[in-house]
Image (cartoon, coloured by chain):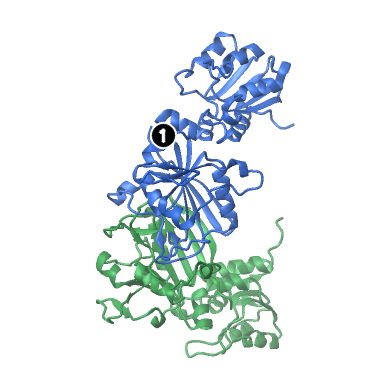
Chain colours: A green, B blue
Amino acid sequence: MPPAPTDADWMAAAVALSQRGRPTAAPNPNVGCLIVQRGRVVARGWTQPGGRPHAEAMALAAAGDAARGATAYVSLEPCAHASPRGPCCTDALIAAGVARVVVAAIDPDPRTDGQGTARLRAAGIAVGTGVLADAARAAMAPWWTRQTRGAPFVTLKLATSLDGCIALADGSSRWITGERARAHGHLERARHEAILVGRGTLLADAPRLDVRLPGLEARSPKKLLLTRGGTAPEGWTAVASPESVAGVDSLLVEGGARAASAFLAADRVDRLLLYRAPILIGGGKAALGDIGLADLAAAHGRWSLVDSRLLGSDRLDVYERIRKE
Amino acid sequence: MPPAPTDADWMAAAVALSQRGRPTAAPNPNVGCLIVQRGRVVARGWTQPGGRPHAEAMALAAAGDAARGATAYVSLEPCAHASPRGPCCTDALIAAGVARVVVAAIDPDPRTDGQGTARLRAAGIAVGTGVLADAARAAMAPWWTRQTRGAPFVTLKLATSLDGCIALADGSSRWITGERARAHGHLERARHEAILVGRGTLLADAPRLDVRLPGLEARSPKKLLLTRGGTAPEGWTAVASPESVAGVDSLLVEGGARAASAFLAADRVDRLLLYRAPILIGGGKAALGDIGLADLAAAHGRWSLVDSRLLGSDRLDVYERIRKE
């Protein structure tokens, strides 16, 4: 027999479930929940599109009586505040008779922030916290970033040649990366609430910015245009500056160099997707313009490699902004 | 007991030995030789500095009587032409009484080119050929390139930020990459006969271009300056164009953008060393200028990733030029 799964093993499954609500759970956090009874999963849940039902509500409904005496694994502390849209999950867990609740991250929302776990404990339920908290926070990075920093979680996508060009000098950029890298880019679109480009890219490429992956067409995000002028074509929303993006938790900045540089100069980029094709262009359009860097020392220690993979003959490197909190 | 080594296993060791003669064996090929008697290595050899003794001569001298009846593994066909500097290795192998010779690559030098193996066979020695031939050729790429294409094997080194810059706009470039990447760069210098920079780099950085690794200081290569003017400071040799590099089999092009672009435009780069630091510069100096690329389609299919590794927080990707021969 294999060894019995640990709390961390069950929580890893709950965190994986939480990814299913990204970005559809927004503006609510994308949470995952697993209900385990005598070593077996009896129900699973994740935050549904629009943010309701919550992960715990979905899992408890699926579990029915099997929740009594069970352990619930939740990637975020159950909410402790009632809402017109439904009862709070803390009360629902108590009512269902679960014996134990294991929580990854404590909810930073001041309406919960420890009150969920306190109420569970007061009801006689065993509570564990902090299990895979970092992984759970990373899985809900967009919501977490808005909660804790009041800003959307911004991913910057760059697709370059080995020498860092995003186009030839004449502007042609089809194609630098291959099919697999471009398909991966569409998957990233499906994981974001909004995509932003600058006016130059809008005029030069007239990008559709939709998700062209079978089954995910309906996941095409909102389209934002970074423009000082304030006007945008139909179907687009004008945004005057990186600081003024509102109403979304996750934003994918797709280009061009001017928009990318504006977000970097404002230190509003949390994650870099670097797709790189094994080609040399030479004298092409640079990926970035001025980002306000004063000297080389200041450039170091800001980005940490979190993923690296080959997509066909292209390489994808994913970096995250190192922020001291 | 582990399984008995195969011919390919022994040859892999001979090819590894051949690397010891790089670049010191030049202008002779860097060859490796292993002599095996009843499943045991009785002697090893590799081409000595300046090209003599040859690998076989070194191994046979070390083996002495133990070579009688043994198998010799040689990464390049033994030479069949006598030289004022020593007897040919084919005759030496026959005289030593080896029973079998296994060869990786056939010597493209018309003075040997199959005659070495033919004479061994005529003397009653069993001969195998083509074992790890590609690996053996790769290990002596500089010599092989001059033999078959009449040009030196050129490695281009680029050290860039993630956005492909080699310096800030003001020219400062110390440091983009970290200590481990720079140490690796010095190791690459030690593996080349000559290093080349352009006049801009010479004036801006006054590079020493020496090998600053303990024990390898004496391996500092010749210094070439790419310059139309034709004059070079003491200790340097002026080179007017990528096509006019002569007298070396292996050349490392270290910078700057103009020299790199000249070699790429002339299609004289065989290998790319791309050191990339996890920093963004934005609006800095591009790694390359115009390399004569007409359209994006022409950029594809030219470079193949052959190695990728992390050096501290920097990444080194090694690409080789794909040439249809």
Look at the image and tell me whether residue B56 can be seen: yes
* Relative vertical location of residue A271 with respect to residue A249 in this rendering, above or below: above
Residue B56's place in the image compared with A186, above or below, is above
Residue B60 in the image: above or below residue B20: above
Q: Amino acid at mark 1?
A: Ala
Front-most of residues B188 and A267: B188
Q: Position of B304 compared to A35: left or right?
A: left
- Of all residues shown, which one is farthest toward the right? B1
Above or below, B135 relative to A227: above
Q: In this rendering, does residue A279 appear at all?
A: no
Marker count (numbered): 1
Label 1 residue SS: loop
At x 71%, y 62%, the residue is A4
Residue B319 vs residue A97, the one in the foreground: B319
Work out whether residue B79 or residue B53 is closer to the camera in this orientation and state it: B53
Residue A277 position in % (x across, y down): 40, 53
Image quadrant where residue A120 sits: bottom right
Q: Chain of mark 1?
A: B
Residue in the image at 63% along x and 43% along y: B216
Residue B200 lies left or right of residue A116; in this view the side is left
Mark 1 lies on residue? B151
Residue B127 position, x and y percent, is: 57, 17
Task: Give neighbour class at mark 1: few <14, some 14-19, many 20+ (Cα, 10 Å).
Answer: many
